[in-house]
Image: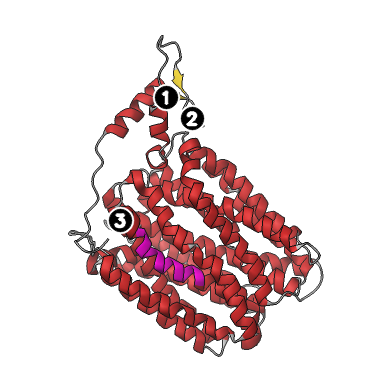
C-alpha cells in the first residue's frame, strides 16, 4: 500500500478509539449522572474538561513530535489515553470523573494531531483529500458502534465497563505504530515557548472552566466570573507575547492565508453548533422522551452512519463543484438539519428521526471534510506543524463551547418555561440556538475565492481539461460545476499547477499518519 493509504489507516486507530470513547460516553451520560448523584447537565464539566485539556496540550504536540519523534509521541499518547480511561472507570465522584477526563485529554491532544501532522508531511497535496478519507472512514466506525454499544453496556451491565473498550484498541494502535509509523521529525526546530504555553494554557483553561460552570450553580457565580475574567487577561497577555516573540507557541500569523483563516474561523462557528449534538441529543431521547440508553444509542448512531456514507463520494463532489460552493451551501443545509432535531417529539416515528439524523450526518461530515482539507491548501511544509496546532486548538475550543452553549441554552429554555428540571419542550429552543450559530459560518465561507483550494480538491485539473474556443471569442472558461474564471486567472492557475511542489520529508524506512 502507498503512504497515502497505510499512513492514515495507522492514525485511524487512535481516532477510532477517541471517537468511540466520546460517543459511548454521550449515550451513557444520564446513567453516569445518576450513579455519581449529580444533575445530568453537570456532566458538561466532564465533556468540557476533556476538550479543554486538548486545547491546552495540542499546541505543544507539533513541537513534541519534532523533538522526540512522531512514533514515540504517538505511542506515549495512546498509553496516557488508556490510563485516563481506567481512571474514568474507577471514578466515584464528579470531581474524580472530571479529573480522569482531563488526563484522557492529554493523551488525545498528542495522538491525533501528531498523526495528522505525519499525514500532511508524507502525502502530496494532490492526494490529501483521498488520504483524509482513508483516515476518517475507519475512524467513523467508532461513532457508529459507540452509541449502540454504550447503550447496551449501560442498560445490561454497568457504565464503568464502557471505558475498558479503549484498552484493546489502544494496544492495537501501539503495535501498528511500531510496525508502520515513520519516525518523522524536523531536523531544525525552534525552542519551546514555555511562557506562551503557560499563558495560553492557563487562559484557555480558566475561560472554559468559568463558562462551563455557569448555570445550575456548579460553582459559585463569583468564582465562575472570576475564572472567565482571569482567563481573558491571560489570553490577552498571550496575544501580546505572540507579537513580540520570534517563535510563539501558537502562530497567529498563519491566519494571513485566506483558506486557512476561513477554515479556522468559519470551521469554529460551524463546530460550535454541531458540537452540542452529542450532548443534547442523548439527553432529549432519554430524559425528554424516556428511552433507555440502548434504544437511544440505536437511534443516534444514524448520524455517524451518514458521515461514513458521504466520505465515499465527498472527493467527487469537491472535484465537481469546488470548496467554496460546497461549503457555502452545506453550511446552511447542515444548520437546518440541526434545527430540525428540536422538532422531534416522543410521538415522532423512529424511522423519521433516524432518516433526519442520517441525512444530517452526511452534510455535516462533508463540511468537516472540506474544512479539514482546505485549511492546508496554501501552506508550505514548514508551516504544517504550527498550522496543525492552531487548527486543532480552534477545533477543540469550538466543540467545548458547543457543549457549554448547548447546556446554557437548555437551562435558559427551562427557565423560560418556568420549571427547574429538564423537559422535552426545552430542547427545540436549545437546538435552534446552536443551529443559528452554526449557520453563521455561511458568511465566512462565502468570502472565499471561487477557485480556493483547487489544487487540493482536484477542481483545477477539471478546469484545465476544458478546451478553449478556437476563435478565442470567449473570455472565460467554465469548469465543470464550477465558477467562471478569466483567461488571466486561468493562466495563473495553469502555471501554479505545473510548478513543482516542495516534497514533504520522507518517512524513515519501516514507518509511515483528522
Give residue 435's quadrant in the image. Answer: bottom right
Give the position of the N terminus as an image quadrant: bottom left
Quadrant of residue 345 within the rendered picture = bottom right
SS majority, magenta: helix
Q: Which residue is mark 1?
A: 466
Labels 3 & 2 near each other (Cβ < 8 A):
no
- 392 or 8: nearer the eye? 8
Asked if the magenta segment contains residue 239, the reply would be no
* Mark whose residue sits in front, 3 or 2: 3
Task: Tell me the distance, in whole angstroms, between the alpha carbons under discs 3 and 2.
Answer: 31 Å
Q: Residues within 10 Å of mark 2 (few under 14, many from 20)?
A: some
The answer to whether residue 140 is seen in the rendering is yes
The boundaries of the magenta stretch are: 8-20
Please report the residue visible at 46 percent of the width from the left and 63 percent of the height from the top: 139
Residue closest to the eye, 39 or 319: 319
Q: For the view shown, which residue lies furthest in the top direction?
A: 471
What label sits on residue 480 in the rendered view? 2
Picture coordinates of residue 141 (x, y %)? 50, 64
CB-based contact (under 8 Å), mark 2 and mark 1: yes
Q: Nearer the viewer, residue 9 or 257?
A: 9
Q: Which mark is residue 1?
A: 3
Amino acid at each position: 500500500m502507498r503512504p497515502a493509504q497505510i499512513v492514515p489507516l495507522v492514525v485511524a486507530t487512535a481516532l477510532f478509539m477517541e471517537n468511540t470513547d466520546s460517543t459511548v460516553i454521550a449515550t451513557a451520560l444520564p446513567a453516569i449522572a445518576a450513579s455519581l448523584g449529580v444533575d445530568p447537565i453537570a456532566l458538561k464539566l466532564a465533556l468540557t474538561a476533556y476538550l479543554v485539556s486538548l486545547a491546552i496540550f495540542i499546541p505543544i504536540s507539533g513541537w513534541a513530535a519534532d523533538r522526540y519523534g512522531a512514533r514515540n509521541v504517538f505511542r506515549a499518547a495512546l498509553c496516557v489515553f488508556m490510563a485516563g480511561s481506567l481512571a474514568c472507570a474507577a471514578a466515584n465522584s464528579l470531581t474524580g470523573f472530571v479529573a480522569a477526563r482531563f488526563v484522557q485529554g492529554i493523551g488525545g491532544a498528542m495522538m491525533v494531531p501528531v498523526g495528522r501532522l505525519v499525514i500532511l508531511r508524507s502525502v502530496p497535496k494532490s492526494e490529501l483529500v483521498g488520504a483524509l478519507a482513508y483516515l476518517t472512514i475507519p475512524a467513523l466506525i467508532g461513532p457508529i458502534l459507540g452509541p449502540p454499544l454504550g447503550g447496551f453496556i449501560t442498560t445490561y451491565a454497568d457504565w464503568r465497563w464502557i471505558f475498558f473498550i479503549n484498552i484493546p484498541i489502544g494496544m492495537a494502535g501501539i503495535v501498528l505504530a511500531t510496525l508502520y509509523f515513520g519516525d518523522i521529525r524536523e531536523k531544525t526546530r525552534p525552542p519551546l515557548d514555555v511562557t506562551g504555553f503557560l499563558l495560553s494554557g492557563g487562559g484557555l483553561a480558566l475561560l472554559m472552566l468559568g463558562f462551563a460552570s455557569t448555570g445550575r450553580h456548579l460553582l459559585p457565580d463569583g468564582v465562575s466570573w472570576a475564572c472567565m475574567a482571569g482567563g481573558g487577561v491571560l489570553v490577552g497577555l498571550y496575544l501580546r507575547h505572540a507579537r513580540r516573540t520570534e517563535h510563539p507557541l501558537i502562530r497567529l500569523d498563519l491566519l494571513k492565508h485566506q483558506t486557512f483563516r476561513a477554515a479556522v474561523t468559519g470551521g469554529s462557528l460551524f463546530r460550535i453548533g454541531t458540537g452540542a449534538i452529542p450532548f443534547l441529543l442523548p439527553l432529549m431521547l432519554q430524559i425528554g422522551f424516556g428511552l433507555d440508553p440502548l434504544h437511544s444509542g440505536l437511534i443516534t448512531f444514524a448520524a455517524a452512519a451518514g458521515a461514513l456514507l458521504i466520505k465515499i463520494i465527498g472527493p467527487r463532489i469537491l472535484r465537481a463543484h469546488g470548496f467554496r460552493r460546497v461549503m457555502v451551501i452545506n453550511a446552511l443545509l447542515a444548520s437546518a438539519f440541526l434545527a430540525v432535531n428540536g422538532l422531534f417529539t416522543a410521538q415522532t416515528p423512529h424511522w423519521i428521526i433516524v432518516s433526519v439524523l442520517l441525512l444530517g450526518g452526511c452534510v455535516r461530515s462533508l463540511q468537516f471534510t472540506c474544512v479539514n482539507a482546505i485549511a492546508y491548501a496554501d501552506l508550505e511544509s514548514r508551516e504544517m506543524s504550527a498550522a496543525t496546532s492552531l487548527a486543532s486548538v480552534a477545533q477543540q475550543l469550538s466543540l467545548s463551547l458547543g457543549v457549554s452553549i448547548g447546556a446554557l441554552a437548555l437551562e435558559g429554555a427551562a427557565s423560560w418555561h418556568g420549571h427547574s428540571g429538564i423537559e422535552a419542550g426545552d430542547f427545540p429552543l436549545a437546538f435552534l440556538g446552536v443551529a443559528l450559530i452554526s449557520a453563521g459560518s455561511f458568511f465566512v465561507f462565502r468570502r472565499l475565492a471561487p477557485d480556493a483550494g483547487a489544487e487540493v480538491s482536484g477542481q483545477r485539473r477539471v478546469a484545465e481539461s476544458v478546451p478553449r474556443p478556437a476563435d478565442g471569442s470567449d473570455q472565460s472558461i467554465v469548469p465543470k460545476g464550477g465558477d467562471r474564471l478569466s483567461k488571466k486567472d486561468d493562466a495563473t492557475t495553469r502555471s501554479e499547477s505545473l510548478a513543482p511542489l516542495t516534497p514533504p520529508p520522507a518517512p524513515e524506512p519501516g514507518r509511515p499518519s483528522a
